[in-house]
Image: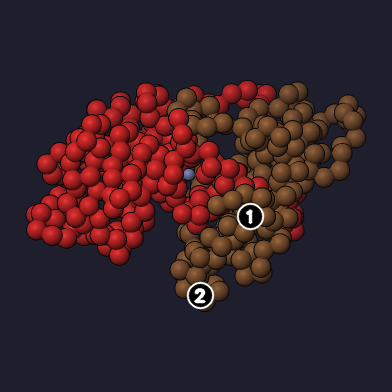
């Protein structure tokens, strides 16, 4: 690993991770990768633990996720998402691959069959960070019982059932809360139904 | 090409984006996303929530020397392009390609009724996905469902209960739904359907067809 970092000092917040990830993609910068690793690997491990993966498994998945981050860095497109969001999708897909031994059918943004624009609207293009911040603010503004089902959705292995059990509410209530939450988020972002 | 008018329910998009959806249902959602910008934006939003969540989780330290071990495994520079995929199937969205290798016509279609053929493409413990091919102007016998079924148009279209379903549109049927879809009189219909329980057919023809459809 080089001792001297030949890059500008990282900017605060999400932009910093985007820049580091782009450095990995463009110049195979191992020091940039190490910085991403120090921030994200322990969080990916925490995510796996919350999903019920045991300690050694979570450790392995966190390391494998970061190796995937290196290998796939060239596919990261900061116009589409921030680094944290992209790393979340890598971790999510890797867990499904490894633990479920199932295929994970995925959208291909270069698919010739794609209908409609592949990229976000032009006025949003330059700033995935601001776009994602608005989404997180919309989630934070939800009524607590709706924010709760959204948050819990990220930590279950089968849809809705585990939340229903945990909160002792019917499955239908979980679904209707999720629908209400998504509707509110759309309204918050200024979209009509 | 216009965007679909009938989308999967929000909680399905949520399950897809968070990573809890089964393979057969994910196949339907990923295929729909190819055809629907509105739902692509929804899923991107859910993933952005996941990113925010990941960023805010309290870190769990990794074992001693984990970074060094990972560093030794970084073989070669990052890839510049997507790894080669299964061979393309012309005219079909990419998520379907591995399931229909060789093309739609080469699938082991089984006749399940006059003008109706089907083939299972993905089966799991929770749900099964099949393709349905219906000749032009065929009315599928009135039937209900033991659980839920989502049917998405890939080619042609169908009409049911006064609504018209075209490419990318998803009809969601619950246990209470009794329907009687009719395929497009000129193009017929090619659909991807995901069922999370056996079909229950009603009516006389339904009873006759039941042993075929309810695999
Ligand atoms: Zn849609």
**Element at badge 1?**
helix
The colouring scheme, among rainbow, by chain, secondary structure or one colour, is by chain
Q: Where is residue B186 in the image (x, y as percent from the top left)?
A: 23, 31
Say which residue label 2 marks: A169
Observer able to see residue B61: yes
In the image, taking residue A154 as reference, residue B99 lies left or right, namely left
Residue depicted at x 55% and y 74%: A167
Chain A, colour shown? brown
**Of residues B175 and B196, the one drawn nearer to the viewer in this rendering:** B175
Q: Where does the image place residue A124, in percent across and percent down from the top left?
A: 70, 37
On screen, residue B56 versus residue B119, left or right, reads right
Above or below, A146 relative to A78: below
Secondary structure, mark 2, is loop
Judge whether residue B123 can be spotted in this image: no
Which residue is the extreme one toward the front?
B162
Left or right? Give the position of B165 relative to B76: left
Toward which corner of the image does residue B175 lie, by quadrant? bottom left
Image coordinates for residue B17, horizontal then vertical, percent = 55, 49
Q: Is residue A163 above or below residue B7?
A: below
Have a look at marks 1 and 2 and say if they share a chain.
yes
Q: Residue at x 62, y 70 (%)?
A: A145
| Circle nearer the N terminus (1, 2) | 2
The label on residue A10 is none
| Protein chain holding label 1 | A
Q: Which residue is drawn at 46% across and 34% down?
A: B2
Numbered mark located on residue A187 in the image: 1
Outermost residue on the bottom side: it is: A168
Query: Chain B hue?
Result: red
The quadrant in which the N terminus of chain A is found is: top right
């Amino acid at each position: 690993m080089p001792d001297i970092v030949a890059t500008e000092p990282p900017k605060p917040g999400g932009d910093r991770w985007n820049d580091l990830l782009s450095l990995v993609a463009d110049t195979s910068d191992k020091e940039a990768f190490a910085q991403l690793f120090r921030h994200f690997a322990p969080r990916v491990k925490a995510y796996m633990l919350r999903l019920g993966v045991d300690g050694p498994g979570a450790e392995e998945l966190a390391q494998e996720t970061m190796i995937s981050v290196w290998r796939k860095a060239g596919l990261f497109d900061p116009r589409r998402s921030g680094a944290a969001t992209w790393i979340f999708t890598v971790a999510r897909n890797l867990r499904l691959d490894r633990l479920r031994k199932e295929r994970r059918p995925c959208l291909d943004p270069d698919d010739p069959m794609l209908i409609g624009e592949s990229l976000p609207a032009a006025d949003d293009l330059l700033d995935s960070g601001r776009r994602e911040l608005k989404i997180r603010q919309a989630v934070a503004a939800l009524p607590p019982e709706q924010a709760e089902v959204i948050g819990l959705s990220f930590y279950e292995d089968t849809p809705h059932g585990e939340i229903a059990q945990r909160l002792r509410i019917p499955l239908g209530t979980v679904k209707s809360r999720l629908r209400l939450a998504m509707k509110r988020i759309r309204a918050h972002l200024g979209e009509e139904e | 090409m216009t965007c679909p008018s009938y989308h999967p329910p929000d909680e399905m998009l949520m399950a897809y984006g968070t990573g809890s959806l089964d393979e057969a249902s994910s196949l339907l959602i990923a295929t729909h996303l190819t055809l629907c910008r509105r739902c692509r934006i929804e899923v991107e939003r859910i993933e952005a929530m996941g990113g925010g969540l990941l960023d805010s989780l309290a870190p769990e330290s990794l074992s001693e020397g984990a970074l060094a071990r990972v560093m030794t495994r970084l073989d070669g520079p990052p890839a510049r392009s997507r790894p080669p995929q299964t061979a393309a199937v012309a005219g079909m969205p990419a998520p379907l390609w591995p399931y229909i290798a060789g093309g739609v016509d080469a699938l082991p279609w089984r006749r399940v009724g006059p003008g109706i053929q089907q083939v299972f493409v993905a089966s799991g413990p929770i749900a099964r996905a099949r393709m349905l091919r219906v000749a032009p102007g065929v009315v599928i016998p009135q039937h209900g469902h033991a659980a839920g079924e989502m049917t998405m148009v890939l080619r042609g279209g169908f009409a049911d209960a006064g609504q018209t379903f075209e490419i990318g549109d998803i009809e969601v049927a619950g246990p209470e739904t009794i329907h009687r879809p009719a395929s497009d009189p000129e193009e017929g219909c090619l659909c991807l359907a995901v069922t999370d329980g056996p079909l229950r057919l009603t009516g006389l023809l339904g009873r006759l067809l039941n042993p075929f459809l309810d695999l």
